[in-house]
Amino acid sequence: MNQPASAFPQVPIAFRPHAGVVKTPLQFGSNAELVATQRTDLQRLLQGFQLPVGDWERFVLGAHDTKSTVRTTPVHPSFQQRVFDASVEMKVAVSNYAMHLTPETRAKLFHDLDEVVNVEDWYEEDALPSALSFRDFLKWTIFSKRYNWLSIGFSDEGYILVAWKSERALLSATFRGNARVLWTATRSSPEGETYAAGESTLQFFEREARLYLD
Amino acid sequence: MNGHTYRNPPIVEAVFEVQFSEPLSGRDLDRLRERFINRYPKVDQQYQVDVEINPDGRATTKAAPIGFRMTSSNALDTVTLQHQRFGTSRMAPYEGWEKFVSTVSANYDEFTKIAGRRTLTRIASRYINRLDIPTEELEGVDVLQFLRFGVAMPDEMSKSIGPFSVAANFSVDEVKVLAQCAVIAPALLNHLSFLFDIDAFIDKDISPHKDAIWAVAERLHQVKNHVFEAGITDRLRERFK
């Protein structure tokens, strides 16, 4: 029993996620400079609000136009709370990939995060973990199907550090959140140890990892 | 209109929300926050941000606090408390309707202990699905092989389609539905990701009785399942089993 469209109230779809696929209108003939100015102003005016990456691209309004959106910001930005929030943010990222992970892998991730991202082991001057870096690690893990990492940690810059071990090699990687990985490998052989290092895309790093871990 | 059972459902977030006509006071919101703080210890303040573009092209904003979003320690469950809405969400992994509605019901009971029974103006069940499909399976293949809800385009215009988004309002058995489908940033390497967001709701003739609310919830759930199953193909369905 369908109803005519007029039976529905206006829905605020302008800020719904689907608007995000409309990319920056920099095509020929657009008012790109105006849009860029608006976004710069918004970033200045909204300092202190946590906005998801890429959210700015959704703010495209015409002159005399008003839009509303809802934004969140932590209530208690104490050091303890910030570390706790960072841990929760990593777990939200795990949740986003839950359908591609087994319960055992999710439990391992949660366990390792609790071990590493906690107020006892974190220093106030350290950068908090980067969610982008952690998401790259999750993407790579699902892509490579390597769920047997030895340990995880975070660099001073907040990038996730991961180590894997095989019978003959130790491989470590820094996921930098830009779809690239810095890696080092140590391979043992009767002739002695050999060392290698590189920086590559996530896909290429999967091929490199096979050389050391399979 | 029963749904299938999936081992790996593509639901990234399930939300159940009620809206009410009489707004909560700031004191009510603070009390509710204290009521939920043990189960949902991460507290974020929510602001409504109004953005206005002036004739000279410059933007001005106004931000006003409207409530809280509170998250559990495992980051999988949240409650949203606002002046005129109360919601419970579950992130992936989704563990089934029975478990979700049991949490929703328990939270609503806690809510009414502080806020009382209010005249409800909207009850909604929203499921946000993310469908990750390997690019090699999509190459040269009509997206309709996977999704039946999307954009139709004549062959004379083009035989392939890039990023798109579509939002449609319709009703199923007197339940209103806002369904949205879009290509979004890929969640996985070598995959394309599609958003399939289904918001089933009623916004009139809502009985305040508790049993009636859960009867409505059941209807919304069935409609949501119906829309989801009608919107995807067996080929896509196989990926969640």
Image: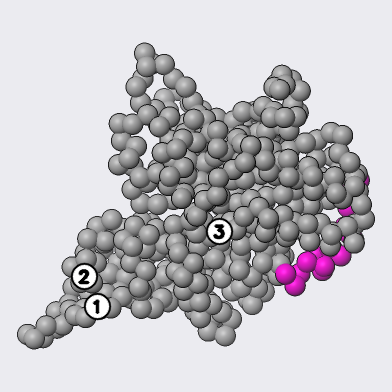
Dot 2: element: loop
* Distance between mark 1 and mark 3 Cα atoms: 31 Å
Q: Which residues are magenta?
A: B22-39
The residue wearing badge 3 is: B93
Instruction: Identify the amino acid type marked 2.
Output: Asp
The residue wearing badge 2 is: A214
Up the image or down, A67 lies above or below B239; here it is above
Picture residue at 56% right of the left edge, 79% below the top: A118
**Can residue B205 be seen?**
yes
Quarter the N terminus of chain B occupies? top right
Single out the residue that lies furthest toward the top. Answer: B156
Q: Position of residue B8 (x, y in %)?
A: 49, 54
Dot 1: element: loop
**Can residue A176 be seen?**
no
The residue wearing badge 1 is: A166
Classed neighbour count for the residue bearing mark 1: other residues with Cα under 10 Å, few (<14), some (14–19), many (≥20):
few
